[in-house]
Amino acid sequence: MKNILILDDDITLSLMLKTWLTKKNYVVQTAIDVAEAKKEVERFKPDLVISDLRLPDESGISFLKWVKNIYPEVVFIMMTGYADIQTAVESIRSGAYDYVAKPINPDELLKKMQTANVIAQQTTKLTHAAKTDKETREENYIRGQSLEYKKVYEYVDLVAPTNLSVFIKGESGVGKEHIARMIHGKSNRSESPFIPVDCGVMNRELSASDFFGHIKGSFTGAISNKTGYFAEANGGTLFLDEIGNLSPDVQMQLLRVLQEKKIKPVGANKEKDVDVRIVVATNEDMEHSITSGKFRSDLYHRLNEFLIKIPTLQECKDDIPLFSHYFLAKANLEINKNIIGFDEETLHCLKEYNWPGNIRQLKNVIFRLVLVSQTPTIPIDLLLDNIPEIYQYCKRHT
């Protein structure tokens, strides 16, 4: 988002914003009324419009509707000296991304511009991804902008090109598999398979067969040869979620495979070479699992060559509006709706909630709200009627 059009009949304010934004490396044009602004839109092709609500010839909302009708991809932020919920909602319902109150706080405006830019980029990716398969869509997950998330992405970029085993730690719902896919996608193995395995639901008796394969007739029920996860992931990445649930026998076998880089299918006489990168994840206290004898310490240290801790959503509350708008766009595509945003009180409530289920819970809530919504924006009453525990939590804590 580079080109910006500022529409305001306050020439001093326009000049101040133009000077300030130009220093931030934006290309800025100004207009004093809607007639001039329409000509600038046609000529200048702005990525972002920052417009006053009250203008000499027409209202800012009528100009907003004109822009969105012809150039729906243009991001629109409304300025108003009459900052009440009614004008904010009307602007958002008409297609504005957000609004700012006068007198303008430049830092607040810049933050909203940057967030709008991220959402616009991700929505574009999401639209293209909707035409591809599920795995590709999952890789187009939005990135948090908080310091905590940025540290995670720095670690991903650092470790991805290596062959180190990665241990991902985080609460349920924080997106551990997404980070694992990101590591795989940025690695030299990205063209090879990524095989995710949920160790929490594996059958203990059949886990060796699931991991290493088996030969037909090697045990009752082995009616054909089976490849196994390691052979399927050969050359690529094997992601083991909920690693703490593995039985002691499989832990010992897994340690040997990591040391020898060979597997032996159940019932086979010969070993097979494998080249697999291991990424594991858990929400358990592994130190306690080791001291209690549930998990082997030598396997833990073999797997934990590089540790990445994913923050909870509660630790990154400033990212909640970003994630919420992203899931809104995703829900619109998948459910075939056209909800354009959230009422201010709704977004405030979403940001205040503690989200014990983290990003997964937020996604489910947004999809539910989009599904049941009958209005252009999602009002607080919809949250009260459909997810009352979130509404009541916010009322108790505000």
Image (spheres, grey):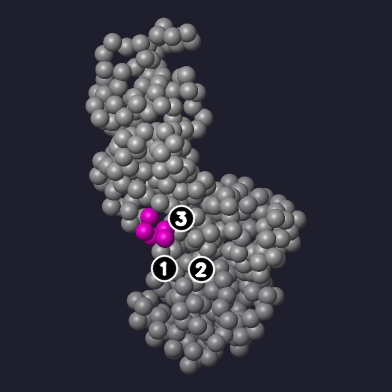
Q: In this rendering, would 327 be left or right of 22?
A: right
Residue drawn at 34 percent across, 48 percent down: 307
CA separation in Å, label 1 and label 3: 29 Å
Which label was assigned to residue 311?
Answer: 3
Instruction: Please tell me how crowded label 3 is: few (under 14), some (14-19), or many (20+) other residues with Cα within 10 Å.
Output: some
Question: Magenta segment, which residues?
Answer: 148-152
Amino acid under disc 2: Val
Residue drawn at 52 percent across, 63 percent down: 317
301 or 58, nearer to the observer? 301
Q: Nearer the viewer, mark 1 or mark 3?
A: 3
Pointer 2 or 1: first along the chain: 1
User: Which secondary structure type mostly characterizes the magenta part of the structure?
Assistant: helix
Helix, strand or loop under label 3 = loop
Pointer 1 or 3: first along the chain: 1
Amino acid under disc 3: Pro
In the picture of the structure, the residue carrying the numbered disc 1 is: 1
Pointer 2 or 3: first along the chain: 2
360 or 37, nearer to the observer? 360
Residue 224 image offset from top left, x and y in percent: 42, 11
Q: Which image quarter is the C terminus in? A: bottom right
Residue found at the very far bottom of the displayed protein? 12
Residue drawn at 61 percent across, 85 percent down: 81
